[in-house]
Every structure is written in structure tokens, then in C-alpha cells.
């Protein structure tokens, strides 16, 4: 933690790149672990198929049944990692959070510049007229939510399988990673592409990887911490190891 804090202290523009592991400590399951969403049986259908664009169009009722049961965690609260990153942004040393998560916990903790590669469950829109709807509207609707203006199908503003990432979002993420002098990768196995490929744009001084399992970036990282992302970031920012960090 002392070494991590030393890197943070000398940095002027930190970018954080995070995945599902950032939210698991808030009680939100990941996707690919033995207890993750993809390991669960749902009527014999693979979750990857249910969460695809073609399945959503063909069977929206079953999609929404799965989506409401397995993908929405409104009771989840930010953990130490979320709050540590919000603190670093407030102090002007973190320029962006680039996240693969769709749960909105970074914003709930106070982060402002959050680049959501895969969208957010809190944004929903009509596929007919483009009208936006809240998560509350989707959750309170029976069956398939429909637009109150045109009757069109309302869908979550999240990237489904068979869909491409938004080009403007990718550009923002690349710019944030390219301009950073320190890139902290946390809570991700770097197995999901094209999102994981964005870290190749980093040209700064220090690369930090915090993850419970090894990643392909470990071999060229300045610092690798195989452990809890919430514990690592919160302890480093509070500097409990040396006692001279921010209060």
C-alpha cells in the first residue's frame, strides 16, 4: 500500500480502468467466476444468449425477466474503491474513471468524469422515438416496457452482445488513457474485448494492476497487487501504512 501511495503522490493525471471486480465487493456478482452470472442456469439458456441483441429483439419478455432478476442491484452501495477514486478526482489527480460496469456506483460515490464503456442500467430509451426513461420506469413496468409517446420498445442503454461500443465513448476513453501519467487497472481480468484492448494506448510512467487473479498486463506493470481492489485503494488513499496521507 505504501508503494501504491508513492505512485499516486507523484502522479498528476491518473486514469482508472476498472471491471466487474470493483463492484463485487458491493454485493454485485461478476460474470465469469464460478459464482458469476454466466455460470447460472436460466431455463437451459446461456446468459450470453439472453443478453444478445438478437435475443432482445426476438424475445423481449424473456430478456426483461432475466434482466430484472439478474442485472439490477439498486440496493448496492459504493465501496472503498469507489470512494477512493472519487476522492482522487476531487483532489485533481485523477482525470477519469473508465469502467466496464453498468451499475452507476462510481457516480453514486461522487465521481464526475465516468466513462461507461458498456452503458448504464440507469439510462433507457425508446427504440422508436428516442425518448429517455428512468430505471424506475423499466422496473415498475409489467412485462416489456413501452414508450408512453409512441408505443415503441424501451431498451436499456447498455451494450448487448452482437453490438459495438459507442465510438464517442471509445474516443473519450482513449484520450483519457493516452493523457494519463499513471494508469491503474483494477477489478478486471482484461479478458473482455474490445474494452481490454484500450489499455494499449497508455504511454505514461506507471502502470498499476490490482486484481485477485493474474492478468496479461502483470508482466509489464510497475506494481501488481493480487488482492481486494476496495481494500487496496482505500488503504493507499488513507495511507494507513505510513500515516502521512490525506485524512
Image: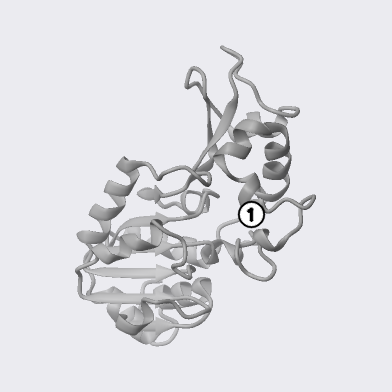
Question: 244 or 102: nearer the eye?
Answer: 102
Residue hosting label 1: 76
Q: Is residue 197 visible?
A: yes
Q: Quadrant of residue 58?
A: top right
Q: Is residue 22 above or below residue 145?
A: below
Tell me: 228 left or right of 199.
right
Question: 8 or 33: nearer the eye?
Answer: 33
- What SS does tag 1 mark? loop
Q: Is residue 89 above or below residue 147?
A: below
Name the spot of residue 232 as percent of width and height, x first: 47, 77
Q: Tell me what residue is drawn at x 32 percent, y 42 percent.
A: 167
Tell me: 110 left or right of 66.
left
Q: Tell me what residue is drawn at x 76 percent, y 57 percent.
A: 41
Question: 162 or 122: nearer the eye?
Answer: 162
Outermost right residue: 43
Name the spot of residue 231 as percent of width and height, x first: 52, 76
Name the quadrant of the C terminus: bottom left
Name the quadrant of the N terminus: bottom left
Name the spot of residue 136 as percent of width and height, x first: 64, 33
Q: Quadrant of residue 61?
A: top right
Q: Tell me what residue is drawn at x 35 percent, y 49 percent.
A: 113
Tell me: 142 left or right of 16.
right
Q: Is residue 244 visible?
A: no
Name the spot of residue 19 as percent of width and height, x first: 48, 62
Q: Is residue 182 above or below residue 114?
A: below
Query: How many C-alpha atoms fall within 10 Å of the one at disc 1: few (<14), some, or many (≥20)?
Result: some
Q: Quadrant of residue 209?
A: bottom left
Amino acid at each position: 500500500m505504501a508503494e501504491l501511495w508513492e505512485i499516486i503522490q507523484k502522479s498528476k493525471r491518473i486514469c482508472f480502468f476498472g471491471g466487474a471486480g470493483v463492484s463485487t465487493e458491493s454485493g454485485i456478482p461478476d460474470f465469469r467466476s464460478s459464482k458469476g452470472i454466466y455460470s447460472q442456469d436460466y431455463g437451459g439458456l446461456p446468459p450470453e444468449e439472453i443478453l444478445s441483441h438478437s435475443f432482445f429483439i426476438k424475445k423481449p419478455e424473456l430478456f426483461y425477466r432475466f434482466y430484472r432478476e439478474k442485472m439490477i442491484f439498486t440496493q448496492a452501495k459504493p465501496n472503498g474503491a469507489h470512494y477512493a477514486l472519487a476522492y482522487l478526482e476531487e483532489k485533481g489527480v485523477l482525470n477519469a474513471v473508465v469502467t466496464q460496469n453498468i451499475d452507476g456506483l462510481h457516480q453514486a460515490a461522487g465521481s464526475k468524469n465516468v466513462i461507461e464503456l458498456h452503458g448504464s442500467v440507469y439510462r433507457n430509451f425508446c427504440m422508436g422515438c428516442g425518448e429517455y426513461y428512468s430505471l424506475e420506469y423499466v422496473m415498475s413496468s409489467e412485462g416489456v416496457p413501452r414508450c408512453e409517446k409512441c408505443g415503441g420498445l424501451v431498451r436499456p442503454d447498455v451494450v448487448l452482445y452482437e453490438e459495438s461500443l459507442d465510438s464517442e465513448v471509445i474516443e473519450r476513453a482513449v484520450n483519457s488513457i493516452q493523457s494519463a501519467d499513471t494508469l491503474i487497472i483494477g477489478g478486471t481480468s482484461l479478458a473482455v474485448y474490445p474494452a481490454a484492448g484500450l489499455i494499449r494506448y497508455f504511454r505514461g510512467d506507471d502502470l498499476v494492476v490490482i486484481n485477485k487473479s493474474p492478468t496479461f498486463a502483470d508482466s509489464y506493470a510497475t506494481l501488481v497487487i493480487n488482492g481486494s481492489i476496495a481494500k487496496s485503494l482505500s488503504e493507499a488513499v488513507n495511507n494507513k501504512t505510513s500515516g502521512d496521507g490525506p485524512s
